[in-house]
Every structure is written in C-alpha cells, then in structure tokens.
C-alpha cells in the first residue's frame, strides 16, 4: 500500500454482517489499516441478532467469525453511538480517511392500499424486531386476540413471521426470542395464519428448506389449495426455460404438500397463491376486521418476468391482524447521497456517488443492504463487502481519500467520548453476552436477551441482568 495513508483509518457505520465482512477484509488486505465500527445499539451483529428467526440458532453461529475479527488490535467497536445523533460526517472526516456505511435496510415497503394504516395492520419488520428484542421495538404491542392473522408476501421473512405466529409456547420459550414476545405469543388467540403470494408457486420468493420446515411443524396443518399450486401455461414454460433444479424441487414440494390431507391439528397455516390484498376492511372502530383479496392471473411483462393481474374475482378473509412482509427499505443517512427510488445510498459498486450525476464522493463507501437493497442471505454480504473494500483499498492507494486533520486512534476516541456519554466496547458486549447466555442456561434457552438500552447500561454498571429488562 505504498500510496495509501499509513495507518489508513476507516470508520464503519453499522455492525451487521456486511460491516463485519468488510472489516475482516480490510484488516486482512492491509497490514496497517485501523477500523473503528459504530452502531447505534450497544450490541453488535445487526440482523443476525434482530432479524434471523429465534429458532434458527445455527444461522446465528456466523457471529463466531465476527467476534474473531474483533480480536484484532487494529479493530475497535463503539456501540451505543448513533451516526447523525452522536457522531456526524464532519466529525468523522476529521479523524478517518474513509467512512463505510453498512446500516442495512431499517424500514419496510408499503402496499399502498386502502386501510393499510388501520389499527391491527403492521409492518413485518416491526414484528420481527419486537420478537427479537430490538430495544427500539420493546414497547410495541401487537393485538393477537383474534383467531386469524394475514401475512402479505411469500418471502422468507413472511415464512418466519407465519412460523412465529404458529409455534406453541414451549417451542418459543426454547429459543432466544425476547421474553416479552414469548409471553405475548403464549396468550395469542391466533389459530389460522394466511400467507398471501400475489404470483404463483414458481415465483414464490421463499426457499425450499423454509417451506419444508413449515410442513414439519407438529401442531400445524399446512393447507395449500391444489388449484393454486398448479402451474399456469406461462409459469410452466418459464420453469422449463429456467432449467433450475432448485426451483423445480420447490415447485414439486409445494404441489406435493397441496395433496396432503389436513390432520386436524390445532393450528392451520394457509399458503395462498395468486391473490393480492386490495383493501383492509375497518371493523367500524378503526381496526382491521378483514382483508379483501383480488384473485390474480399471470401475464408477461416488459421486464420479462411474469406479473400478477387481477382477474376481477375477489374474496374476503376475516382477520384481526395483518402483517405486510413485502420487503425492507433503506433509510437515508444525514449528509450521505441517497437514491430515493431504490432506497439505497447512491453508489457505483460500493463507491458513494451523486444520485443525479453519478459523480463519486471521495472517501465515502457503502456495503450490504443499504448498498444493493434487501436481497440475499447473510453470506451474500461477503462478496458484496469484498467488492467495496477492493474499491476502498484501490482508492487509498491512489490517494483518493478524505483529508483528516487528526487521523489518530486517540483523537478519534476523544471525539467519540465527547459525543456519546457511554460508548460500549466489544469487551463490554462480551460481558453482556455472557450475562445473556448465563440467564439462558437458567431458563433452558440459548440466551435471555437484554431488550432495552437502559438494562444493558445498568448491567455494565454492575446492576442487574437481562431478566429484569
Ligand atoms: P423478499 O424475498 O424480497 O420477498 C418479498 C415478498 O413480498 C415477495 O413474495 C414479493 O412478491 C412480495 N411483494 C412485494 N410487494 C408486494 C405487494 N405490493 N403485494 C403483495 N406482495 C408483494 O423479501 P423478504 O422476505 O423481506 O426477505 C429479504 C431477504 O432476506 C431475502 O433475500 C430473503 O431470502 C432473506 N431472508 C432469508 C432468510 C433465511 O435464509 N431463512 C430469512 C429471512 C430473510 P413478488 O415476488 O411478486 O414481488
């Protein structure tokens, strides 16, 4: 790295998978680079902690690799430090040569239909954050005193939400689901969950293992209408052309599950295809009472993919709670160019640019969902982060960086402590982690999560553990 500053000082905003993959690659590729990682929460790991379903512990083991990155003497974690509230771009530009934004997609897309904002209609993103113990959603209340719930969308998030609504209390309690959510779901009256796909089985976004898991829940009948599982001529031709064995197996599984007779189990999960919500119906008191659906057929579109078109037939499903699970969306960061159309930081292969002119903004970079949109699995962020880091190191080599007046670890630390009353270090997080795991061992689950920032800071001050959050 002959032309690069030495040490090259990098700030990463966000501490999810994309952030850790990027930090890992920077530290491995440059023997002198120093990385400081910031997160608005005291806890690291982003969606691995607050997005991955609580009953998918194996997926969460990816954090072991992230914790190994944090052992580098050239890495520091500053949790409980929010970009835009505590630190800002001007401040970071005084201490770092490069700033990488990896803040994920923090909000949801909307359906844009009448009734969407009635009481009882929620974004799936909020429900997921709530049951996973995200402190910002700790006090949300989901009214589950209704026999039927609707989940709109057939991506893996919709499947997670449907599964969480369908599990029994003892199944939930054995996971690391936030204890307030286990208690609320234990009181849930929901027995029928309707998951709505606007297109057909060949276009479903969920993956086969997730569907198989649904079909194996001991207390749930998975109900699929064979007529909706059948492929129309356009989908059959598309499937033939795609010649994709994974997709073919998924369609075959859907069709075979559709022939399975219900076993009279206490809960039912209805997986529907070719239906779109047209409106949420008011119960007369501002709450959702039902969802009116348009039946769809598939037609060719300009993009080449098949799209849903209403046939004119409609139906109504009575349901007191509705979750829209139609995708996440990125949130703009103060002072950072944003592409409002796609909900991402404007960028060219990870280099931040003007959304209008595409002119590059030296020293600023992005990775993960805030770079490319909310797609792919955790591992997808590795190649994505590597692409960005490649650009960062090439630019550093060419001298295209910010021009910090005080590019030292000590000056940056002083700046952060001036801006934030209680930054949380990685060692602090490891203490919280140990307390959570200890509490989990007592409760018979992987961990009992701290679900408020106050309870985390109190525990770090030696007062209390996660049970009292
Ligand atoms: P997603 O996979 O993009 O699925 C979004 C779903 O919403 C699609 O079925 C889409 O249908 C539907 N949709 C969009 N707009 C709609 C509308 N207006 N009306 C009705 N339906 C609409 O998104 P996601 O489920 O939020 O997941 C995000 C990413 O995280 C995905 O890559 C996912 O695989 C990943 N993830 C993985 C796991 C796992 O590995 N277990 C778990 C959770 C999430 P169309 O296809 O017709 O647009």
Image: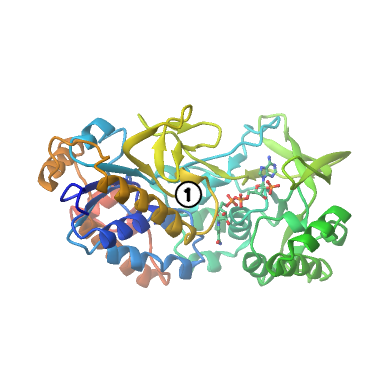
Q: Is residue 381 left or right of residue 144?
A: left
Viewer-nearest residue: 133 or 195: 195
Count of marks, rendered view: 1
**Which quarter of the rendering shows the N terminus?**
bottom left
Q: Residue at x 26, y 35 (%)?
A: 86
The quarter of the displayed image where residue 278 is located: top right
Q: Residue 63, located in which quarter of the rendered image?
A: bottom left
Report the side of 70 relative to 255 (left or right): left
Residue in the image at 15% along x and 50% along y: 6
Applied colour scheme: rainbow
- Residue located 16% across and 41% down the image: 417
On screen, residue 7 above or below 440:
above
Q: Is residue 87 left or right of residue 355?
A: left
**Quadrant of res 185:** bottom right
Residue 216 in picture, x, y percent from top left: 67, 72
Label 1 CB-ligand 1 distance < 8 A: no
Q: Position of residue 172 (x, y in %)?
A: 52, 64
Q: Residue 65, image x and y in percent?
A: 34, 67
Tell me, yes or no, if residue 305 can be seen here.
yes
Identified at 30% across, 62% down, the residue is 433
Q: Is residue 208 above or below residue 228?
A: below
Q: Nearer the viewer, residue 13 or 113?
A: 13
Position of 28 relative to 33 (above/below): below
Asked if residue 16 shows in the view, the reply is no
At label 1, counting other C-alpha atoms closer than 10 Å, the crowd grade (few under 14, some 14-19, many 20 or more) is many
Residue indicated by mark 1: 129
Element class at badge 1: helix
Residue 149 horizontal/vertical position (percent): 68, 49
Q: Residue furthest left?
A: 410
Q: Nearer the viewer, residue 367 or 177?
A: 367
């Amino acid at each position: 790295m002959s032309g690069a500053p030495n040490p090259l000082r990098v700030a990463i905003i966000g501490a999810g998978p994309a952030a850790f993959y990027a930090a890992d690659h920077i530290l491995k590729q440059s023997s002198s680079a120093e990385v400081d990682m910031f997160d608005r929460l005291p806890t690291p790991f982003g969606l691995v902690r607050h997005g991955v379903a609580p009953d998918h512990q194996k997926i969460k083991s990816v954090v072991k690799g992230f914790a190994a990155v944090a052992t580098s003497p050239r890495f520091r974690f500053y949790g409980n430090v929010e970009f835009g509230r505590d630190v800002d771009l001007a401040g970071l530009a005084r201490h770092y040569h490069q700033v990488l934004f990896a803040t994920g997609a923090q909000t949801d897309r909307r359906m844009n239909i009448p009734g969407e904002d009635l009481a009882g209609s929620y974004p799936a993103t909020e429900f997921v954050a709530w049951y996973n113990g995200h402190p910002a959603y700790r006090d949300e209340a989901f009214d589950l005193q209704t026999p039927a719930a609707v989940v709109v969308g057939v991506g893996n998030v919709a499947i997670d939400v449907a599964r969480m609504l369908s599990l029994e209390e003892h199944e939930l309690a054995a996971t690391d689901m936030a204890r307030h959510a286990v208690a609320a779901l234990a009181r849930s009256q929901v027995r029928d969950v309707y998951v709505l796909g606007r297109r057909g089985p060949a276009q479903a976004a969920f993956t086969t293992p997730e569907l198989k898991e649904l079909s194996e829940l001991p207390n749930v009948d998975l109900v699929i209408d064979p007529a909706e599982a059948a492929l129309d001529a356009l989908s059959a031709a598309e499937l033939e052309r795609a010649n994709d064995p994974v997709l073919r197996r998924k369609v075959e599984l859907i069709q075979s599950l559709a022939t399975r007779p219900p076993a009279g189990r206490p809960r039912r999960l209805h997986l529907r295809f070719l239906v779109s919500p047209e409106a949420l119906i008011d119960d007369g008191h501002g709450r959702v009472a039902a969802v009116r659906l348009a039946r769809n057929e598939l037609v060719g579109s300009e993009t080449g993919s098949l799209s849903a078109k209403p046939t004119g037939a409609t139906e109504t499903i009575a349901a007191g709670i509705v979750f829209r699970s139609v995708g996440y969306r990125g949130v703009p960061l103060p002072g950072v160019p944003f592409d409002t159309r796609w909900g991402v930081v404007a960028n060219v292969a990870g280099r931040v640019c003007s959304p209008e002119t595409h002119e590059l903004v030296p020293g600023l970079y992005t990775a993960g969902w805030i770079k490319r949109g909310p797609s792919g699995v955790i591992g997808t962020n590795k190649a994505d982060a590597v692409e960005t880091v490649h650009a960062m190191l090439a630019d550093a080599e060419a001298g295209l960086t910010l021009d910090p007046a005080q590019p030292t670890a000590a000056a940056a630390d002083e700046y952060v402590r001036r801006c934030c009353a209680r930054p949380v270090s990685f060692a602090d997080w490891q203490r919280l982690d140990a307390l959570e795991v200890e509490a989990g061992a007592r409760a018979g689950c992987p961990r009992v999560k701290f679900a408020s920032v106050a309870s985390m800071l109190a525990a770090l001050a030696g007062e209390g553990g996660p049970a009292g959050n």
